Image (cartoon, rainbow, N blue to C red):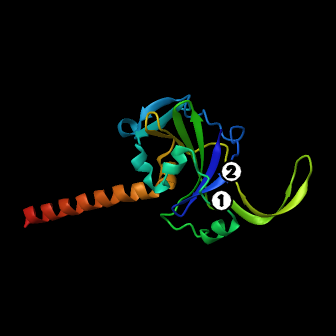
Amino acid sequence: MSILYCHIGGTNYRVGNISLEDTWDLKTYENCQKKDYRKEHGRSLEKKETFYIQAPLKMLEDYHLELVIGGDTSSLNTIDLNVLEENDSNRKNQSKVLFVRTEEGDDVKLYFQAIRRGAVIKKGFVLLGNQPCIENGAVILIREQIDAYWSRKDEKLYFKDIKDLERILPHFFEKKFKILDKDLELLRTLITNICT
């Protein structure tokens, strides 16, 4: 069973039991040759390759995934138009992400897709199908490919482009840059002290 969630402004919302298997090719990353990003980040990937980084659950702490991983998310709020409008500005460190939770045996997998600017449309639309009708509300446009997926079994995060990972985990990258910035400042101080 697949459950779709939306992560906005640090909060998870349950969208519902929606099958995205026909829209998202969930096996794309799994059938690729996996390359360690730390060792091979300077090169372009071939079509059937993907990068990975070690990603224990703690690394995904911005998502507060304890409930999601456990499977009982009945206590989560459902997403509505008000949530989308309140977070429409999408400030730099507030990711908007759709993610799907699947279970395969003893493994839980999470598939992520960032909601990019312009992907939320709040207008009337004609819903085509067996019984066409006119609807008013919000629509979130989704792309065919996922940006990343995480497997609990091997605690790895798989992705094709590091920029997609930055959209999904902005706080993780912000912490890394702060550590790097601190180290650079220490190095500047040392060099200044040596030169004077």
> Dot 1: within a 10 Å radius of its alpha carbon, few (fewer than 14), some, or many (20 or more) residues?
some
> Dot 2: within a 10 Å radius of its alpha carbon, few (fewer than 14), some, or many (20 or more) residues?
some
- Left or right: residue 42 versus residue 187 is right
Residue nearest the observer in this picture, 171 or 60: 60
Q: Which amino acid lies under the numbered mark 1 shown in the image of this protein?
A: Thr
- In the picture, which quadrant includes the N terminus? top right
Please report the residue visible at 68 percent of the width from the left and 50 percent of the height from the top: 16
- In the picture, which quadrant includes the C terminus? bottom left
Q: Which amino acid lies under the numbered mark 2 shown in the image of this protein?
A: Gly
Point out residue 80 in the picture as x, y percentages from the top left corner: 69, 63
Point out residue 30 in the picture as x, y percentages from the top left corner: 55, 31
Point out residue 54 in the picture as x, y percentages from the top left corner: 39, 40
The answer to whether any part of residue 43 appears in the image is no
Point out residue 191 in the picture as x, y percentages from the top left corner: 14, 61
* Picture quadrant of residue 85: bottom right
In three-dimensional space, the C-alpha distance between marks 2 and 1, rounded to whole angstroms, equals 8 Å
Q: In the rendered image, which residue does mark 2 sit on?
A: 16
Residue nearest the observer in this picture, 82 or 138: 82
Label 2 with label 1: CB-CB less than 8 Å: yes
* Picture quadrant of residue 141: bottom right
Label number found at residue 78: 1
Mark found first going from the N terminus, 2 or 1 = 2
Please report the residue visible at 91 percent of the width from the left and 53 percent of the height from the top: 132
Is residue 152 positioned above or below 112 on the image? above
Residue nearest the observer in this picture, 194 or 110: 110
SS at circle 2: strand
* Picture quadrant of residue 79: bottom right
The answer to whether any part of residue 150 appears in the image is yes
Is residue 1 positioned above or below 178 on the image? above
SS at circle 1: loop
Please report the residue visible at 39 percent of the width from the left and 36 percent of the height from the top: 40
Label number found at residue 56: none
